[in-house]
Image (tube, coloured by chain):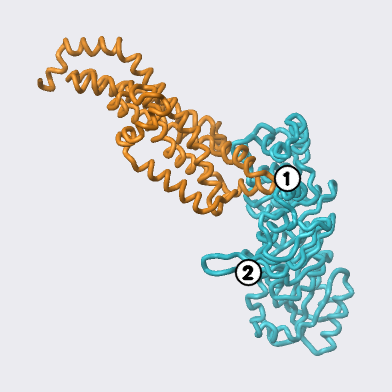
Chain colours: A orange, B cyan
Amino acid sequence: MNFASAFTPEKLQEAWDCLLNEFPFAIWETLYSTLLATFFAIVIGLPLGVLLVTGEQKGIRPLPAPVMSFLNVMINLLRSVPFIILMVMIIPLTRAIVGTSVGTVASIVPLTVAAFPFIARLVESSLREVNPNIIEAAQSMGASTWQIVTRVMLPESVPSLITNFTLAITTIMGYTAMSGAVGGGGLGKLALSYGYQRYRFAVLYLAVIVLVIITQVIQSFGTWLARQSDKRLKEK
Amino acid sequence: MIELRNLSKLFTTTDGPVDALKHINLTINNGDIYGIIGMSGAGKSTLVRCINMLERPTEGTVLLDGVDLGTLDKKEIQKVRRRITMIFQSFNLLMQRTCLENIMLPLRLARVPAAQAKARAMELLETVELPNKANSYPAQLSGGQQQRVAIARALATEPEVLLCDEATSALDPKTTHAILELIREINRKMGITVIVITHQMSVVQEICNRVAILENGEVVEEGEVSEVFSNPRTNATRSLIYPEMTEGVMLFSKGGQRLRVMFNGAVTEPLIARMAIDCGIAASILGASTRSVGDRAYGYMLLDIPGGPEDLAKAVGYLSRIPDITVQVEAEYKAEEAEK
């Protein structure tokens, strides 16, 4: 089987049929595992990112240094395990939560575990961009720690958070493709098991092209939304 | 009334401890526009942050109407900060919120209902003369306009004291004047006590009634502005009021008799020429630093008086008859300068 024979008219016809029949569901699986995983990762990662900023020794509500060290080490550990290995490592956790370790729903667990430390770091960097003078101004108005976080720090960093969450979504979508290797559904699985393993390279390339297009759309939309939401840009 | 009693602040840095404030004693009466002036690094910012407990003093007390702020817990301090509000050099408005929302913020933090907060914010926009900027974002405003919004925000909770931390340092002279005018009006109409932190003498000159001079964390001079300005007793004060004076104007002195003439709001007139005509004394000006505020002069002039002691006495007599001018014979000036 040589490479060129993967692009004969029959093969292309086959790929085209696959595009019509298999792709819509695969795209749906990719999107929904990506978005759900991003959602859960934000639910865990956002508060964690806030703690990383407010809890440090010069933050607005310092936490004990050992607590901060623990959080940082935990995040760094999770961030440094390659996703494909993490997926296998946490199979027991996935089973405990979903009941199975195979399938698209099950893949959301490792995706979330891999993404929340990443989100926490992104939130941390967004919040650090907030002008400390503005936080001091809020303190001078009598704002509590909770009020400073919810009414000043988070609202002031919305454009940056949107930019960073867009980055997170596209990265997590890359992970979903990998999760195809251990039974997660979506375009990744399509590309690997239909395309690569059965030598239907046209399908493989089509899946990649669709992934590239989706990534582009998400990235462009995120960039547009971040710009729209930023009131510091005068020309609007 | 705000009383600072034996207030000290020690910062522990990597280079060892730093005395930011040393045993400060000040009393700021209700209705004052109180200036605290000093060079950068003198401790002004730390001092003003001790007043609303953004910095906890290491030693000493801050009394607001007799209540020691150091004994209050977090919640109570947050309430005090609605009574002592603050404006800043960099305005510090929330950039992602409209002017109206910025002004509403302190009210919303104090759990005032939205409708009520909005009505109050609109009122305050009128007060600061920006009624049509309600829905503009700070980035769309000039510096002066941003500071006006910040002032409106600081007034939202109907404070008793307004702290101004270098509030006009980022503004051009004309805008500075307009903002100071607004602050003066707020002080007069609403009876709000104002504490002005600045390194600019002109700011103190323009609006303050009392002033404290801060140097290396210590108050070196304190009192009525006119008093302190016309008779600076320390070198720190002198170098703030007359920066040129420390730069060796005495080089031009021929070693004669020297008179220091202090203008404390005297009506501007050709003084030296008139003295020449009226007394026949041809004084030469060795150095001068005067400022006009309206048609009144503030500052000093250093004169060399030729002739003998009678001429000197004559000149002193002539000049001290003019209202709002004080005269001092500067016989030991040179010696004092040499000590430094």
Chain hosting mark 1: B
Measuring 42% from the left and 48% from the top, which residue is drawn there?
A: A73
Report the front residue among B265 and B13: B13
Q: Which mark, by number, is residue B276?
A: none
Q: Amino acid at mark 1?
A: Ala
How far is mark 2 from mark 1, CA to CA? Answer: 30 Å
Depicted A45 relative to depicted B265: above or below: above
Q: Is the residue marked by circle 2 packed among few (<14), some (14-19), or many (20+) residues within 10 Å? A: some
Secondary structure of the residue carrying tag 1 is helix
Q: Which circle's residue, 2 or 1, is located before the other in the chain?
A: 2
**Residue B138 screen position, x and y as percent:** 62, 39
The residue under label 2 is B19
Depicted B294 relative to depicted B92: above or below: below
**Residue A93 screen position, x and y as percent:** 39, 32
Q: Is the residue marked by circle 1 packed among few (<14), some (14-19), or many (20+) residues within 10 Å? A: many
Q: Answer left or right for B140 relative to B295.
A: left
Report the front residue among A86 and A54: A86
Q: Which mark, by number, is residue B154?
A: 1
